[in-house]
Image (tube, rainbow, N blue to C red):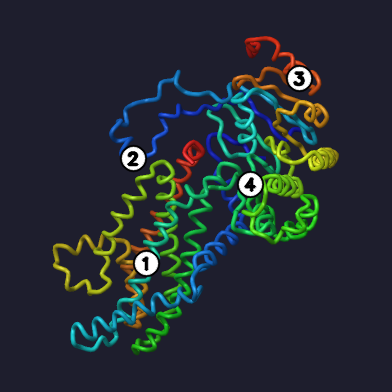
Amino acid sequence: MRIAGRRVPLREEVRELAARRELLVNLVRRDLTVRYKRSLLGFLWTFLNPLIFMVILTVVFGTLFAGNAGRFPAYILPAYLVLQFFLQTTTTAMTSMAWNGPILRRVYVPPSLFPLSVVVSGFVNLGLSYLPLGLVMALTGAPFSWALVTVLPSSLLLFLFVLGCSWALAAVAVYFDDVRLMYQAGSYIFMFLTPIFYPLEIVPERFRPLIYANPLYHFSELIRTPVFHGQLPSWHHVAVAAAWAAGSLLLGWLVIRHLSPGFFRHL
Amino acid sequence: MHVLTLSSVSVHFPPRREVQRSLKELLIRGLGQRTQQEDVFWALREVDLAVGAGETWGVVGRNGAGKSTLLRLAAGIIFPSRGEVRVWGRVAPVIELAAGFDRELTGRENILFNASLLGIPGREARRRISEIVEFAQLEEVVDAPLRTYSSGMLARLAFAVATSVRADIVLLDEVLAVGDQFFRARCADRIGELCREGTTVLYVSHDLTSLARLCRRAVWLERGRVAAVGEAEEVLAAYRASDAVAPPPSPS
C-alpha cells in the first residue's frame, strides 16, 4: 500500500528505487550509447580523451620547459580524472530532472533516480578511463604496487560524494533555472583550488587552508598517491574524504526529499 | 476491498505568477512575501472517494474540474495539499500521450523502456512484447523510430503497454479519443477483460456514450468538488442534465 501524504515515506521510496533497477540500467545504457552515437570513433573516446590529454602534457612540458616531461603525466592524470568526473557529472546531473520533466509529469518515478543514473554513467566512464591511466603509468614507469587496490574504495567514496552533490544541485535546479548558470561559472573555482599541475608545497602557506577546504583535493590525493607514488593514501585524506562523502550524501538526500513534493509545480 | 481511497483530499496550485523561475527573482521579490490565500487555485477540494478492486470508474466534469488532477494523485505524480491518498498495488497511467516515450528509440525499445518506467521487470516485458505489438497493430513499424509514428499509432502503443503489464489500477485520460472506431472497440473489449480479471480502471472522458457502456461506477467533479458519485447511469444522467441548467448546480 502506498500512502501519498505530503511526501513519500523513506522506506517506500527506497523500495520504489529498488523496483526500478532495470530503468536505471536502461538510462545508463542509453546515456553511454547516445553520448558517442554521432561520433566516428564512438566508445573509443572514453579512452582517447585522457590519452590525448597526456600527449599534450608531454609535448607542452617537454618543449616549453625544455626538459623531460618524465613521470609528470602520471602525476597529473589521476587528479585530472577526478576533477573531470566531478565537474562533468554534477553539471549533467543538475539538469537531469528538469530534462526528464515530461516523464516525471506523467508517470511516478522516484525523481532521485535521474541524477543517480547520470552519476552511475559518469562513474562507468571514470572506470573506463582508468585503463588509459594504467597505460600512462606503464609508459612513464610508475610503480605498480599493491597500494593500487585502494583506488577502488577511494573511487566509491568519490562516487558517493558526487551523488550527494548531484542530488542537491538537481533538486534546486528544478526550482531555479539560473542556479545552473551560476554553477557553471562558479565551479571553475574547483579548477584553481585542486592542485593538478603543481604540488601543494609550492602554494604559499597562507592560501593552503583554501585547498584543504576543497574536498576534491582530498579525493584526488586518494587516487594520486597509489598511482604516482605507489603508496597507500594517508589516513588524513581518507578520513576527510569519507566525511565529505557522508555529509554530501546525507545533505543531498535531505534536499531532494524535502523539495520533491513541489517538483510537479515546476517541471 | 479498496485499491484507492481519497479522504478529504485537497490539492492547490500556486497562482501562475507565483511560480518563480529564477533565484534572482526570488531574491528581488523578497523571501518574506507569502502567497495570498485567496489567490491559490484549488484543483480539488475535500474530495472523498473509495474505489474497489475490479471496478471500472468513469470520471466526468467540465474542463478544469480536477479530473486529471485526480488521476495524477492516484498515479503518485502529485501530492495532496491536505488529506490522504491511499493506493494498493501497481498503477499504470496513460496520462497524456507518449508518456515516457523517446522519439529516437524504436517502438520495441520504447515498450521495454516504458515497462521499466512502470517498474516492470524486463523479463516480464519481453514476454509480453509480441502481445503488445499485436494488440496495437504495429507489427510492421515496431522497429522504426517513434518519431515516424502517427498520433493514432502512439495512442495505440501507449494503451497497449499500460493495459498489458498486469497493473492493479489502470488510469486512462482521454486516450481513446485519438484512435479510430475499430481500435476503440477493441479497447472497450480490453477494458472489459481487465475488469473481469480484477483490474481497476479509472477512465476520464468526455465521451459519455462510451463511458456509459464501459463503466459501472462514476464520479462527477465540478470545480474541484465531487458533485455526484455512484452508479454510472445515475451520475452520467445527472451530469448530462446539468448542461440544461445554467449555472451548474452548486457542488454539495
Q: Name the residue that disc number 3 marks.
A: B235
Residue B235, compared with residue B108, is above or below; it is above
Q: Are marks 1 and 2 in contact (CB under 8 Å)?
A: no
Q: Name the residue that disc number 2 marks.
A: B23
How far apart are labels 2 and 4 at the CA level?
A: 32 Å
Q: How many residues crowd mark 1 within 10 Å: few (<14), some (14–19), many (20+)?
A: some
The quarter of the picture where residue B245 lies is top right
Question: Are labels 1 and 2 on one chain?
Answer: no
Chain ID of residue with mark 3: B
Task: Say left or right for B16 vs B7.
Answer: left
Inspect the image, locate mark 4, and give the three-letter code of the amino acid beneath it. Ala
Chain ID of residue with mark 1: A
Task: Say left or right for B227 vs B191.
Answer: left
**Looking at the image, is mark 3 or mark 2 earlier in the sequence?**
2
**Looking at the image, is mark 2 or mark 4 earlier in the sequence?**
2
Secondary element at tag 2 = helix
Residue A139, compared with residue A152, is above or below; it is below
**Looking at the image, is mark 4 or mark 3 earlier in the sequence?**
4
Residue in the picture at 41% in, 69% down: A154
Q: Name the residue that disc number 1 marks.
A: A84
Residue A21, compared with residue B22, is above or below; it is below
Q: Residue B46, percent across and down?
A: 60, 21
Is residue A232 at all visible to an observer of this figure?
A: yes
How far apart are labels 1 and 3 at the CA level?
A: 61 Å
Q: Closer to the observer: label 2 or label 4?
A: 4
Q: Closer to the observer: label 1 or label 4?
A: 4
Secondary element at tag 4 = loop
Q: Name the residue that disc number 4 marks.
A: B98
